[in-house]
């Protein structure tokens, strides 16, 4: 029998000292539990994804120096650790197998992925082949990331007791079921167990959900780590576990967990203590405020309510009620006089022109300046509250409501925002006033304004965006689904004409395969939509 532990931990990119301390602490804990083999995820020592830090020789050398420290601390236990190995001028995405303080083998990742968040082939040289290891009478192999895809075609990987897959797989909504399906298939195909060890935590726009698992040769889950939490998953092989694990993903709760972890780690890892956001009395800011309180605690979240001449008494009241329900401190900074001052000084130049979007945008930019003033004065991180539907269509003001250090909802559609609001209310006893959820969305930048003055109803808009952006359907294909040609032309034009705004949007939290900030990059100068719509 062999006792194995999968260390599903939250590492920070570039914090090699901190990551080393966490690894050594886990080593000590594993030894106390009589673990024979301790497994860490891909690139644990450096954090993932390290990006252009890999171009720095001092970064690589520090990684190698601390690898030696970890090796020297691994007496009495075997360890598999993801790190960067340097062989002359080339560097490799590597793992080391260390047993009782001695390096048994260092091997490299073969298939270098080209993900938007980490172009591995820009930095690493690919390895060749896989390697067999032996420990306490067990024969096994270790593969990094996507190398798992090739194991069913490798004649060398026969008669193994288990295969270890160390990975850094970011959370993507719906992906976990596909991962489980793939691993189960490969376990059955290779007639051995597969141990899948993943990172957990937030890193810039990415959130790693963990969900490390041990899958039997029959494709059944023998052990499952907690999702979105650090965990030490321990399994003894051969396993007699008969517990059934449910990996079915509930969409809204998964989004909720991912966003909370993304907020928490972005704020803490970047050295912020507190966050601030504009609270308008609308659904988006209500959801961001609720998520932030859950992620950071009410004493670390501040709201700013900035009523204008067009703010209704209902939304003003709801904004204050929301802050009260959440228990957060808030400031009321009316922008009436500031706005009228702008109009006064612009009047000589605009006197022959009617009020239009110019004056609407001035209000949004006044609010942005106020939020950034609080940020500069007190060191608070400004949270942006815009959603994916608005960002896709450019229904947002550049240098206005688009400002902020982290765009929490930028990969969340408006319809998903409403689902999150209802989910938060179930968890926290109606934190978000029902009137906010029921009120028709409005920017309140002029009297009687509704979002539907400019955009289709959000359920229709989000459906169109899914077809056009996620599925890349043509105008003809979308019309065949019963959608109006005129409406489609309008939405397509909005999406195409708004790319320049998306290029300047703040960093957001990714939860889908179609993240507007990184993945959907149209040419700013682009007339294709006219030809095809």
Image (spheres, rainbow, N blue to C red):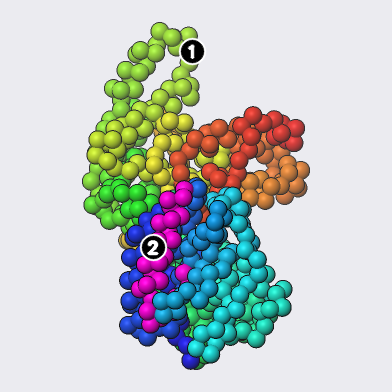
Circle 2 is placed at which residue position?
Answer: 66
Comparing 250 with 62, the one in front is 62
Span colored in magenta? 56-81
> Which residue does the image show at 46% across and 55% down from the upper left?
60
Is the residue marked by circle 1 packed among few (<14), some (14-19), or many (20+) residues within 10 Å?
Answer: few
Is the residue marked by circle 2 packed among few (<14), some (14-19), or many (20+) residues within 10 Å?
Answer: some
Q: Which residue lies most toward the front here?
A: 88
> Which residue does the image show at 32% across and 17% down from the upper left?
341
Circle 1 is placed at which residue position?
Answer: 353
Q: Quadrant of residue 102?
A: bottom left
Comparing 386 with 476, the one in front is 386
Q: Quadrant of the C terminus?
A: top right
User: Does 114 sit left or right of 280 as displayed?
Assistant: right
Task: Work out whether 144 lies above or below 158.
Answer: above
How many callouts does the rendering have?
Answer: 2
The answer to whether residue 260 is visible is no
The answer to whether residue 370 is visible is yes
């Amino acid at each position: 029998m062999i006792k194995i532990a999968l260390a599903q931990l939250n590492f920070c990119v570039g914090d090699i000292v901190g990551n080393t301390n966490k690894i050594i602490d886990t080593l000590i804990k594993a030894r106390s539990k009589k673990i024979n083999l301790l497994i860490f995820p891909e690139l644990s020592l450096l954090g993932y994804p390290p990006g252009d830090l890999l171009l720095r020789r001092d970064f690589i050398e520090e990684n190698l120096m601390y690898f030696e420290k970890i090796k020297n601390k691994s007496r009495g236990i075997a360890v598999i650790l993801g790190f960067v190995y340097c062989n002359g001028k080339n560097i490799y995405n590597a793992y080391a197998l260390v047993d009782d303080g001695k390096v048994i083998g260092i091997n490299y990742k073969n298939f270098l992925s080209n993900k938007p968040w980490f172009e591995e082939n820009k930095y690493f040289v690919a390895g060749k082949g896989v390697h067999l290891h032996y420990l306490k009478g067990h024969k096994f192999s270790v593969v990094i990331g996507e190398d798992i895809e090739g194991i069913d075609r490798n004649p060398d990987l026969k008669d193994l007791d288990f295969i270890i897959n160390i990975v850094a797989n970011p959370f993507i909504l719906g992906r976990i079921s596909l991962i489980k399906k793939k691993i189960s298939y490969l376990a059955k195909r290779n007639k051995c167990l597969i141990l899948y060890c993943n990172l957990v935590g937030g890193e810039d726009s990415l959130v790693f959900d963990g969900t490390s698992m041990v899958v039997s040769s029959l494709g059944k889950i023998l052990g499952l780590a907690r999702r979105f939490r650090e965990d030490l998953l321990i399994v003894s092989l051969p396993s007699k576990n008969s517990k059934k694990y449910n990996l079915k993903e509930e969409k809204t709760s998964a989004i909720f967990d991912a966003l909370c972890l993304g907020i928490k780690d972005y704020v803490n890892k970047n050295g912020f203590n507190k966050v601030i956001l504009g609270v308008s009395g609308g659904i988006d800011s209500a959801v961001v405020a609720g998520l932030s309180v859950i992620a950071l605690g009410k004493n670390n979240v501040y709201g700013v309510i900035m009523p204008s001449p067009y703010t209704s008494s209902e939304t003003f009241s709801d904004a204050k009620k929301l802050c009260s329900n959440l228990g957060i401190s808030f400031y009321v900074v009316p922008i009436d006089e500031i706005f009228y001052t702008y109009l006064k000084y612009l009047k000589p130049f605009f006197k022959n022109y009617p009020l239009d979007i110019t004056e609407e945008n001035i209000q949004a930019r006044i609010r942005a300046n106020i939020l950034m003033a609080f940020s500069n004065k007190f060191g608070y991180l400004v949270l942006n509250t815009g959603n994916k539907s608005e960002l896709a269509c450019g229904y947002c003001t550049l240098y206005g409501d688009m400002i902020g250090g982290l765009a929490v909802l930028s990969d969340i559609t408006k319809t998903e925002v409403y689902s999150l609001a209802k989910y938060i209310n179930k968890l926290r006893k109606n934190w978000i006033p029902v009137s906010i959820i029921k009120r028709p969305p409005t920017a309140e930048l002029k009297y009687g304004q509704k979002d539907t003055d400019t955009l289709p109803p959000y359920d229709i808009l989000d459906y169109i965006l899914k077809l056009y952006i996620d599925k890349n359907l043509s105008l003809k294909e979308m019309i065949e689904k019963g959608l109006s040609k005129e409406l489609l032309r309008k939405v397509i034009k909005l999406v195409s004409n708004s790319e320049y705004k998306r290029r300047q949007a703040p960093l957001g939290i990714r939860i889908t395969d179609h993240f507007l900030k990184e993945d959907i990059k149209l040419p700013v100068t682009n007339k294709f939509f006219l030809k095809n719509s």
